[in-house]
Amino acid sequence: MPEIVLKNVTKKWGGFTAVENLNLEIEDGAFITLLGPSGCGKTTTLRMIAGLETPTSGEITIGGTVVFSSQKGINISAAKRDIGFLFQNYALWPHMTVYQNIAFGLETLKWKKPDIEKRVAQMLETLQITQFAQRYPSELSGGQQQRVAIARTLAPSPKVLFMDEPLSNLDAKLRGEMRTELKRLHADTGSTFVYVTHDQLEAMTMATKICLMKEGVLQQYDPPLTVYNHPSNRFVADFVGNPTMNFIPAKAVKLSDNTARLEMLGEKFTFTSENSFMLKDGDISVGIRPEHLPISPKGSVPGQLTGTAYSTLPAGMETTVKIKIGGTILSSVMFGSLDYKVDSEICFTVQSDRILIFDVDGRCATSGTVTK
């Protein structure tokens, strides 16, 4: 499988910049998700790598071969880049059986009939759709059609598989099942997957690395848990995670290279980081994940804060509790079937070594621990 390298890739339409100076290295056999809100440039990036869009400037290399270079005047067509593309709408031929849909591309490539039969059988077995070989797309469920589309795309053994929001047309239960299947398929095939989504849950659960974009600019490119626990800025911290991170207005006074005094939620805290950090005294934001605000009975643990239950959202396995303290509403997540009466007293603590501090420009200054 090839390595994909983007160097200073930019795409403009008139005065609008869809992707700006993007540098990216996708390793062999990786599962990369291009993540971000609508209009952030993720689909444009995917289409430029695939050869379906022409960059305004920059260079793209696939497997050591330059497929686009504005300086060298190179622009290899999509058909010659040896890639597979899985679209949102499946695009199956309605008048062909499952077998014929998968075999069609191989016939176009002039494969020999015995090789086609062998490869189609292999794909049917890999995607667990052997029993549907003689059915037509209209006789299949959405998930089954998706498997056929994946099998057809993988049949010619493309170097890279590109997917543009392929699960968005499925219901929630089926999306969950297909995430599992795609991740397993990636492990079984060892192929390089590049996947576009606006769903941060898909990105977190499937990817080996997340490429998070905003308005055409790369915000962070790291493994999912690094993006979650060590976001590069406030946008990343807010976009990844459900419920979203709590951002608490605070005032900071630097005490030493790695400590600061914080005033927030009407209380004073000492913040300590393992590393030295730069921070100007004054207004900041403190980021705390909902799971790091555990609720406990009054007086049961030291350092408790007290608020009231603004609302409670039990979901069976876990409960999201909205806590009002002063003029701030915080989210807390507790495991179990819990419920709290609206406006009842809630006692909670700040409990984590991953409390984040963001400066006035939204940059993440550091992470650390707070003590009351």
Image (cartoon, rainbow, N blue to C red):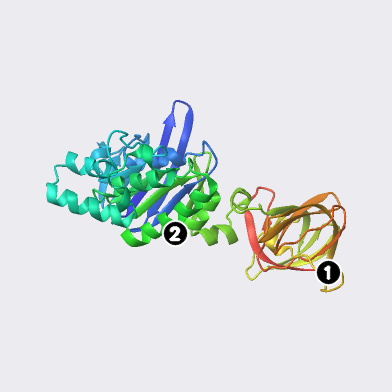
Of the pair 316 and 266, the residue shown nearer to us? 316
Residue 166 visible (yes or no): no
Q: Is residue 126 left or right of residue 172?
A: left
Tell us which disc is closer to us: 1 or 2: 1
Q: Which mark is residue 228?
A: none
Q: Secondary structure at mark 2?
A: loop
Q: Secondary structure at mark 1?
A: loop
Give the residue pinned by disc 1.
Answer: 297
Q: Position of residue 191 (x, y in %)?
A: 32, 56
Q: Residue furthest top?
A: 14
In the rendered view, tell whether residue 57 sits above or below residue 174. above
Q: Quadrant of the C terminus?
A: bottom right
Q: Is residue 84 left or right of residue 257?
A: left
Give the residue pinned by disc 2.
Answer: 208
Q: Is residue 63 left or right of residue 187?
A: left
Q: Position of residue 57 (x, y in %)?
A: 36, 37
Of the pair 265 and 30, the residue shown nearer to us? 30
Residue 240 visible (yes or no): yes
Q: Quadrant of the N terminus?
A: bottom left
